């Protein structure tokens, strides 16, 4: 079976290998971390490049206005030559307000005015981004304009520089691309290995769980040393496996005990039939039929109780209704036939609980029947409210149950010697059924100390107000 579990795990690993990488948790987390890093890199890069572009624009505009100021200082109230020198800028012009070019640098000499906008008088400067500057086809330029007072009148000085590229600086863009690529590689590699290391305990748990079968529940998953969610998961899995193992052990013990109790009357009936067939003339057949009928009735009683327990174990979703326990007990006692000893009722009215009336009637019948078999003179059934519980107690004045046997009597097929003497046809499942009924009502059924001599079985359920 270990080999089968390992092969299943290997097949699962090969299936994961054949399918797309992103379906694994490691792949999904790595992809997500990488995508988040890409978004952050893009945003950071855009902010850096935008800042660099604005800085470059400001730098070039300072150069342009500086060139215009130099022209104003050179030609203020002086004659303007037809050719001027363009320093630190690509080109420059001096233009009359009507648009006639008075002077220009060598690169734009003979070209029409490079811009048509004019700066206001106050402040006496302005700048534009233009993509149709004469002499610079197919290029966008930054143009700064400023008023220059000359001897021949006020002129407009235009200076121009190429617009910087959107990325601001080629080396900076290259550095950002290299740094982003390195960061993405680190994040992807780190995420992949970090998630793999984090999931390593889960893989170990998977290996152990693959080894567990219905016949071998002894395996437990390893519990990591770190106090985290995976440790909590491993602890819960181990607790669940403990519960499953205990449940399986109970079912095996129950099956063994049930088969033993069923086999005993069958074996006895078979032996009597074989003896009768060996000497048919010496057999009292009516007595034989009575004995066989008793055996069949015992088998039927055991089968009915086993079926009842199985239904109680399987069905925990029965409908419970608000019930007055005093009225229910009174109605059930009135339907009972007189028994070996009388049954006395001590019922507090208006004690309400949520219960299944059929199941609670079955519990009451079992407890009263059991009490009447062991009572000396009488049985008392009491209903009361106590400490937030609805309490149903059945007491007898018999020999009582020893303290060390008070839990044993609730085990399936457990029968004390006195019980076997008083009820040879009993199945040993009556009190076990009663405790299961109590559990379905979120209650408890225990043996408590009686006020006097005898036995006191007490059912406690949540009290409804």
Image (cartoon, helix red, strand yellow):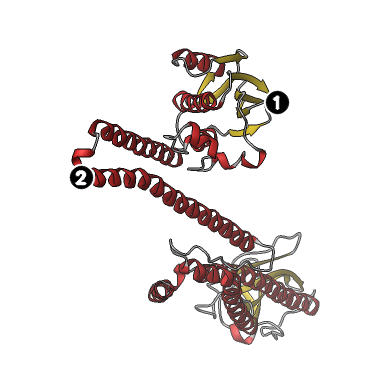
| Residue 30 shows in this picture | no
Percent across and percent down for residue 428 are: 47, 39
Q: Residue at coordinates 65% horizontally, 64% vertically from top-left?
A: 118
- The residue carrying pointer 1 sits among few (fewer than 14), some (14 to 19) or many (20 or more) residues within 10 Å by Cα, namely few
Q: Nearer the viewer, residue 331 or 274?
A: 274
**Which mark is first along the chain, 2 or 1?**
2
Nearer the observer: mark 1 or 2; the answer is 2
- The residue carrying pointer 2 sits among few (fewer than 14), some (14 to 19) or many (20 or more) residues within 10 Å by Cα, namely few
Q: Residue at coordinates 28% horizontally, 32% vertically from top-left?
A: 287
Is 271 rendered above or below residue 84?
above
Check residue 277 in the rendering and tell me which mark sits there, or answer none.
2
Q: Look at mark 1 in the image and give the residue it sits on.
A: 387
Judged from the image, the secondary structure of the residue bearing numbered disc 1 is: loop
Is 411 rendered above or below residue 76?
above
Q: Nearer the viewer, residue 125 or 204?
A: 204
Splitting the image into 4 quarters, where does residue 460 fall? Answer: top right
Q: Nearer the viewer, residue 15 or 289?
A: 289
Q: Residue at coordinates 26% horizontally, 33% vertically from top-left?
A: 289
Furthest residue to the front?
A: 282
Is 76 on the left-hand or right-hand side of 214?
right
Furthest residue to the left?
A: 281
Splitting the image into 4 quarters, where does residue 199 fall? Answer: bottom right
Q: Nearer the viewer, residue 448 or 362?
A: 448
């Amino acid at each position: 079976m270990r080999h089968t579990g390992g092969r299943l795990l290997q097949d699962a690993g090969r299936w994961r290998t054949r399918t797309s990488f992103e379906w694994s948790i490691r792949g999904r987390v790595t992809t997500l971390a990488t995508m988040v890093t890409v978004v952050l890199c893009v945003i950071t890069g855009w902010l850096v490049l935008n800042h660099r572009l604005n800085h470059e624009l400001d730098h070039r505009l300072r150069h342009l206005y500086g060139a215009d100021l130099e022209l104003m200082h050179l030609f203020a109230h002086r004659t303007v030559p037809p050719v001027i020198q363009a320093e630190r800028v690509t080109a420059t012009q001096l233009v009359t307000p009507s648009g006639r070019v008075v002077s220009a640098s060598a690169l734009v000499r003979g070209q029409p005015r490079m811009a048509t906008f004019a700066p206001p008088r106050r402040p006496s400067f302005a700048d534009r981004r233009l993509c149709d500057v004469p002499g610079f086809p197919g290029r966008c330029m930054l143009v700064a304009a400023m008023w220059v007072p000359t001897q021949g009148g006020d002129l407009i000085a235009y200076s121009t520089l190429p617009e910087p590229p959107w990325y601001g600086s080629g080396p900076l863009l290259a550095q950002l691309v290299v740094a982003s690529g390195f960061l993405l590689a680190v994040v992807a590699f780190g995420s992949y290995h970090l998630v793999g290391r984090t999931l390593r305990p889960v893989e170990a748990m998977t290996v152990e769980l693959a080894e567990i079968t219905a016949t071998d529940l002894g395996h437990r998953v390893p519990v990591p040393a770190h106090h985290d969610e995976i440790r909590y998961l491993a602890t819960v899995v181990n607790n669940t496996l403990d519960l499953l193992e205990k449940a399986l052990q109970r079912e095996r013990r129950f099956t063994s005990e049930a088969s033993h109790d069923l086999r005993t009357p069958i074996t006895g009936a078979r032996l009597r039939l074989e003896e009768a067939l060996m000497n048919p003339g010496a057999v009292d057949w009516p007595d034989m039929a009575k004995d066989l009928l008793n055996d069949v009735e015992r088998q039927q009683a055991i089968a009915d109780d086993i079926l009842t327990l199985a239904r109680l174990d399987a069905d925990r979703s029965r409908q419970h209704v608000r019930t007055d326990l005093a009225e229910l007990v009174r109605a059930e006692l009135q339907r009972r036939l007189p028994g070996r000893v009388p049954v006395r009722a001590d019922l507090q009215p208006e004690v309400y609980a949520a219960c299944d009336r059929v199941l609670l009637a079955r519990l009451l019948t079992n407890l009263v029947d059991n009490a009447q078999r062991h009572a000396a003179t009488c049985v008392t059934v009491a209903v009361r409210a106590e400490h937030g519980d609805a309490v149903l107690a059945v007491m007898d004045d018999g020999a009582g149950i020893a303290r060390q046997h008070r839990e044993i009597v609730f085990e399936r097929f457990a029968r004390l010697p006195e019980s076997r003497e008083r009820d040879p046809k009993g199945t040993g499942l009556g009190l076990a059924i009663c405790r299961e009924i109590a559990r379905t009502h979120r209650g408890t059924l225990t043996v408590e100390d009686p006020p006097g001599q005898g036995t006191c079985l007490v059912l406690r359920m949540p009290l409804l107000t």
